[in-house]
Amino acid sequence: MNITVKLAALSLSVAASAASTEEVTRDALPSLLAQCQQQREAKIAPLRAQAIETCINEKRKDPSYCENYYRTYGNAKRRSNGTMMPGMFWDLPVCERALAAEKYFKKYPSRGVFSP
């Protein structure tokens, strides 16, 4: 591998890490959380549609029942033993950053900027 390729790879990795370590202000947190929800919903929607289709076609259930049953597919839910099953796709980078900032602002209410 020549030096040019190594430098290009290094600069890309530095740029990617810089983008993920941007400061988050208290005022910007709601929009960051909204971005997280949008990205999660974009990933969950096809899976939800597939679950509804499977319910209708393979389980022979009423379409309105299936749509109602799977309307919260992908969200956190309580298990029968009382523990919580986490929602899907909270591991997206924007979500991790938003949750870390939210946790930080709850822990330090007087601070206005979160920098990972």
Image: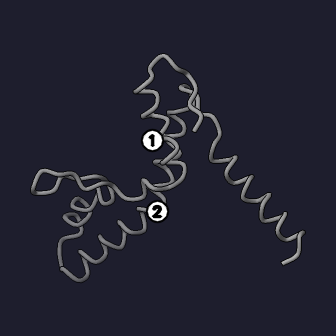
Mark 1: give few (<14), some (14-19) or many (20+) Cα within 10 Å: some
Disc 2 residue crowd, few under 14, some 14–19, many 20+, Cα 10 Å: some
Query: Could you tell me which secondary element the residue under label 2 belongs to?
Result: helix
* Quarter occupied by residue 32: top right
Is residue 5 depicted above or below 76 in this figure?
below
- The residue that appears at 45% across and 41% down in the rendered structure is 99
> In x, y percent, where is residue 60?
18, 79
Q: Which residue in the protein does label 2 denote? A: 43
Residue indicated by mark 1: 99
- Counting residues from the start of the chain, the first of labels 1 and 2 encountered is 2
User: Which quarter shows the C terminus?
Assistant: top right
Q: Is residue 10 left or right of residue 101?
A: right
Whole-angstrom CA distance, mark 1 to mark 2, is 18 Å
Amino acid type of the residue that numbered disc 1 sits on in the rendered structure: Leu
Residue at position x 24%, y 74% in the image: 55
Location of residue 5 in the rendering, given as x and y in whole percent from the top left corner: 85, 71
Name the foreground residue: 60 vs 38. 38
Q: Secondary structure at mark 1?
A: helix
Amino acid tagged 2: Lys
Query: Which quadrant, please, contains the N terminus?
Result: bottom right
The answer to whether residue 52 is above or below residue 109 is: below
Residue drawn at point x = 49 percent, y = 50 percent: 38
Q: Is residue 62 left or right of residue 35?
A: left
